[in-house]
Amino acid sequence: MNLGRLLTPFQVSTALARNYGKHNKKYLYKDGKKYEGIIYYPRFPDHQDPPIEPAKLFRVQRIKPVKGNPFWEKRILKDLGLDGKQSDFTVVKNIPENNARLWKIKHLIKVTPVTFPYGEPTAQDVKHTILKENGECLVTKDIGPVAVRTEAREAFDQQPKRLDTDLLRKDSRLKWLNPW
């Protein structure tokens, strides 16, 4: 750099900002916390992550076609039962073996953790469970015994302000004849 001539502001800023060589990550990022081989750099020094309870099950759905993929990816999809229609899904356990298989085909699938907002189903509730697309597993319980339902029906039929078919027919006919 020739100091005898005048420099433009751009030349001054580029001359001062240039830094050759690699960054020393240990010097730049010295406040990292190590979690099982992964260094994590929190935004604030006293930052604490909220406790996370991992999901026991995953809902796995294929979102990309099988055609054009290597044989090992097709084999994994077939083992999971995802080689049929694209809208089909399967439920797998959250264990390291399954997670490794899902990692190999992560570009072909959509993984959603299964949650139980009203508690896990029992053996009697298995017939009444519904797994929604967002991963919620809902249990639809029985309404109750038949005797309770018949009593509720009789009480409804005996209500004087009940809207029955005759009353609705009469009211709609009057509104048809006199609209305003």
Image: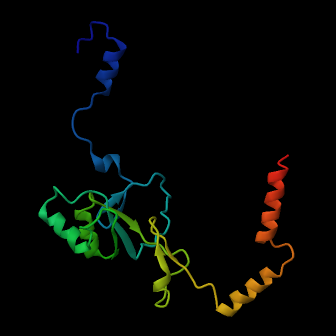
Q: Above or below — where is 28 with respect to 49? A: above
Q: Is 165 rendered above or below residue 126?
A: above
Q: Nearer the viewer, residue 7 or 155?
A: 155
* Residue furthest left as drawn: 71
Q: Is residue 128 above or below residue 171?
A: below
Q: Position of residue 132 (x, y in %)?
A: 46, 69
Q: Residue drawn 27% across and 7% down?
A: 4
Q: Quadrant of residue 135?
A: bottom left
Q: Residue 65 falls in which quadrant of the image?
A: bottom left
Q: Is residue 72 left or right of residue 110?
A: left
Left or right placement of residue 123 versus residue 26 in this view: right
Say which of 28 and 79 sits in front: 79
Q: Nearer the viewer, residue 16 or 140?
A: 140
Residue 60: image location, x then y, percent:
34, 68
Task: Give the percent coordinates (x, y) of residue 3.
Answer: 27, 11
Coordinates of residue 154 in the picture (x, y in percent): 77, 86
Left or right? Give the position of 138 relative to 25.
right
Q: Nearer the viewer, residue 87 or 46?
A: 87
At a point 21% along the width and 37% down the height, the residue shown is 21
Q: In the rendered view, how is the structure colored?
A: rainbow
Instruction: Determine the residue positioned at 28% across, 70% down.
Output: 99
Instruction: Check the picture and name the quadrant holding the N terminus.
Output: top left
Count of all numbered marks drawn on residues in the image: 0
Q: Which residue corresponds to the image point at 26% horizontal and 42% vertical from the top-left?
A: 23
